[in-house]
Image (tube, rainbow, N blue to C red):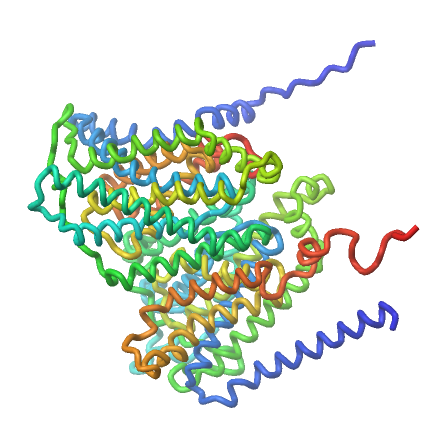
Amino acid sequence: MSRLAELRDSRRANLIAGGAVLLFAILLPLFLNPLNGFIDRSVIALAYVVMALGLNVVVGFAGLLDLGYVAFYAIGAYGAGWFASDYFSGANNKHGVHVLVQGKAAESALSHTPTAGIHLNFLIILVIAICLTALAGVVIGLPTLRLRGDYIAIVTLAFGEIVGTIAVNGDQISVPFTHTATLTNGQQAISPLDPLSLPILGEFNQATNIRPFYWVALALVVFTLFVNFRLRDSRLGRAWIALREDEVAAASMGVPLVRTKLLAYATGAALGGMAGAFLGYYINSVNAGTFEFAFSIFVLAMVILGGLGSIWGVVVGALALSYINYYLIPDVFNDIPSKLGLDFSLTQLSFGIFGFLLVIMMVLRPAGLIPERRRKLELEEGVGTGETELYEVRA
Amino acid sequence: MEAATIPTPRQTPGTVLRELASKYGLIAVLAAMPLYYGITDLANGNSLARLGTNLFEGLSNGAIWALIALGYTLVYGIIELINFAHGDLFMIGSFVSFGFFGTIGLTLATGTLGLVLGLVVTMLLAMVACGALNVMIERVAYRPLRNAPKLAPLITAVGFSFILQNVGLLWLGGSQQGVPDLLRAQDELFNVVGIPVTRADVLAIGVTAPLVLALTTFVNRSRLGKAMRATAQDPEAARLMGINVDTTISLTFLLGGLLAGAAGLTYALYETGIRYDQGFRAGLIAFTAAVMGGIGNLRGAVLGGLIIGCIQQISDNRIGGQWTPAIVFAYLVLIMVFRPQGLLGEETREAG
């Protein structure tokens, strides 16, 4: 078989495999109870996949170690909290602002008066979250432009912590031009949010059926995957990879460093913000206490464990870690000690087990679960020792 | 024909400003807060004693951060790894000390001689325990990944951080655990120009100063220290020169662990309260200190720790403790903007 036909075949096989996985993912909830705990964990896992793919753009493609990813989760979630709840109750003279919303979000069920606060459609919220976080990404990226390597990590970490601190203490910061509104509700959380509703499909009811949330999350994942693949193969994506491999060489080849780096931050941040806004809707509250450094580390672990820069690897890594953390340890493994006649619950050991699994998986597969092809070549084979010989070895 | 001359860059206001900023910006940033509060205090008719107290307490608090920061900087200097488990190692140091107080029966009633002897033994034990644990962690989690991609050990470090935290959680439970106030830490020993010096301050500085001195002497003077510096500079060349790189790296982890153990005991006596997640926040602060001073640089780590201690105290006392993390990290970002290589760091490839 010629090399070209082989490639074409492998591409087709990939497409078929991808389609089958997608079909399975779409149909999965239909086999389960609409309020099944597994679907609930899956929704969260899918949101994490979006986050991890976003971080993969920054860390995996562009090679900029970002330890403050939680900032974008926070800003995205607050985008939903601010503009899709009663939180800014003073807005528009307490009559509220409503854009393309119906049902509970638009008017109160009892008196049929318009609800107070700002209420925008879910899709508009997503766009707002994307814009806000992309902007935040650029702002965070600016001071790191002169830095490299781990120094970038520490500055992004600092920004993540600053955003977290502001979120926690935001109830002491008043919003300009208003009388009572504060920036965030601190540890008291902004809750509840509007029910998620989409055009044509209408409003989703979380109390009776969580399948639609699953499909929305899945749609976000598919969108993110599409963005990731197209970006990776674009001029910009190649510029990112060039930057990761050797910044000086990339610059001398004409890659504009500032723009390329900032675009990486903005793209990664925007995807994180999108997932953050969705998670805000799904959890139905935006609590400052959840925006911790541990979250950044959790997402980073997904990216590194999956395989830096490898899109499918990151998907697998994100699914593996979030199912381990939210499903296997609390739900599945939890009864094992009692079944063995031991008197303790695994919840006390949960993060110890999680840490242990991280160590084991990383030691067994240092390059990640599914290493990126380009990286794998560098690590294992080196240049010019592949199948195709560049010159005749034997005399 | 004239020889071509290299044109000197024109002195525009922009370049002058930039030069000034890079020369004095850092000092201005660091001095801003103390100066501001000093001037407001004086303007309101108060003395500088309050600011002095803030700064002095900052120094003694920062001495503990310095001990932890040294562990980060040692490890980073030699294998370029942000050792996320280091803060939790420090927590284990506190817990070991607390446990040992109970074992040897140190209470508030113990006499002075017994107390001093007991504390010295406890400190040695905590140091050895943390040092051994750190060496073990390096063996299990970092050595197998020596040739792996650079970020892989970061994740095993996070894994061990979780494991150690869980050990702490199972050991003493999830709530704050009171440590007997053996030294009566808040008692004032003497008072210099209105600045009270407590026993806790003396303890923190009295533990840190000799240890830092011993460490720097060891690294700069001894044969093993030379091996460490050589390995940090170029592991491959060091190996070719006959240095056992693996042993040297283990030694570095041992030293970092010893300091973390000492810091653990000091912290327990200083704050008279320990908690399983204390290491997380402390680790973050100490790492910030190490970066601020120029990571890989021993004196830098100490300086960074002391500066962060001062910033924290001023912020706690004047602005409010809940804002302290944001202020410390804002300072970190500013320092990175003005001096990417840290206060005492040299220009490296990482921070050009």
Is A300 located above or below residue A39 in the figure?
A: above
* Point 38% across, 60% down: residue: B163
Is A228 located above or below residue B40 in the figure?
A: below
- Name the residue at the left extreme: B109
A15 to the left or right of B100: right
Indicate the position of residue A173 as horizontal and vertical percent values.
Answer: 31, 51
A202 to the left or right of B320: right
* Snapshot quadrant of residue B159: bottom left
* Point 29% across, 42% down: residue: B262
Is A305 located above or below residue B230 in the figure?
A: below
* Point 49% across, 66% down: residue: A275
Which image quadrant: the N terminus of chain A? Answer: bottom right
B310 to the left or right of B144: left
- Name the residue at the top extreme: B1
Foreground: B272 or B14? B272
Let me know if residue B44 appears in the view: yes
Indicate the position of residue A218 as horizontal and vertical percent values.
Answer: 55, 75
